[in-house]
Amino acid sequence: MKLIIQIPCLNEAETLPETLKALPRQVPGFTVVEWLVVDDGSQDKTAEVARALGVDHVVRHRRNKGLARAFITGLNESLALGADVIVNTDADNQYEAGDIPKLVAPILEGKADIVIGARPINTHKHFSLTKKLLQKLGSWVVRQVSHTDIPDTTSGFRALNREAAQRTMVFNEYTYTLETIIQAGHRKLAITSIPVRVNEVKRPSRLFHSIPSYVRQSMITIVRIYVIYRPFHFFGSIGLLFFLVGVLIGMRFLYYYLTGGGSGHLQSLILMSVLLGMGFQTVLIAFVADLFAANRKMLEEIRYLQREQSDRNLDL
């Protein structure tokens, strides 16, 4: 069994030594443990520091592509290197590396495909009250959309088995944390969470620049992911809402018309026609989007089967 611990990095030359110092070289249940650093176009000497400190594999983007792309690059490289389980952690040493054996345990026991490390949000001294509330609210929204029970959906400390990594795709460029959980829920992957410890954070978050920015980006991410994975429900609900409002306005016009006052409410008739037309068009969009979603699922399944067949060929 081979475990690869991947670390997406952007200008982490200063924090990387401490992070690597804490990483294990032996984990129960695995015969091989390797480290992989994904340098996402750093302007400092992140890649050089990683190599000097004994990192087994260093992959470098020539330009910055964002955290989500760095995460996927790490997964793809880990799969190519033959990883059976992949652990993702942050370069700022936020997560306690000593919890990695606990993080991979549900996968080794065959109980989960993905395990998310849940931080102690309530007692996290580096989280302001506002950030704690936003984290809880965001996690609740993701749980509703994904039909999972993950308390800390923005945690980057997570483990994936080979099948989950092969099936993971990220369309969003902001972050991978939310989309991968929603994706796992809709693909019926076994996903669970365990409590993990955290270390003192020595630099501010690069995703949480400000509260308005964080809320805006998170909501855009959740809506876009929902449209990708539940397009018929999304557009169909909007279309039915247009229909409902149009029918109510039409009933209002009909009431006044039957009671002799319809001539003064012609604008209601026009508005009703517009809303019913918009409702009909939106429902049509729902059907078309659902066809695209079915096609995407088929292509994703083909992609997974191709990767699985490639693994079998290598084993022969």
Image (spheres, grey):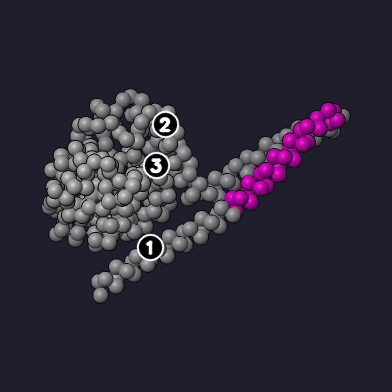
Q: Compare residues 202 and 107 and report the one nearer the observer.
A: 202
Mark 3 nearby-residue class (10 Å; few <14, some 14–19, many ≥20)? some
In x, y percent, where is residue 67?
33, 44
Amino acid found under the numbered disc labelled 3? Tyr
Residue 69 painted magenta: no
In x, y percent, where is residue 14?
19, 37
Mark 1 or mark 3, whichever is nearer to me? 3
The secondary structure that dominates the magenta segment is helix
Q: Which residues are magenta?
A: 261-287
Residue underneath mark 3: 174
Q: Residue at x 26, y 53 (%)?
A: 59
Q: Compare residues 4 and 146 and report the one nearer the observer.
A: 4
Q: Quadrant of the N terminus?
A: bottom left
Residue 270 painted magenta: yes
Residue underneath mark 1: 304
Residue 213 shows which numbered tag?
Answer: 2
Amino acid found under the numbered disc labelled 2? Ser
N-terminal label among 2 and 3 = 3
**Side of 239 relative to 79 (left or right):** right
Q: Residue at x 23, y 38 (%)?
A: 92
**Side of 271 relative to 209 (left or right):** right
**Residue 245 in view of the camera:** yes
Residue 81, located in which quarter of the rendered image? bottom left
Q: Element under label 2?
A: helix
Q: Cα distance, mark 2 to mark 3? A: 12 Å
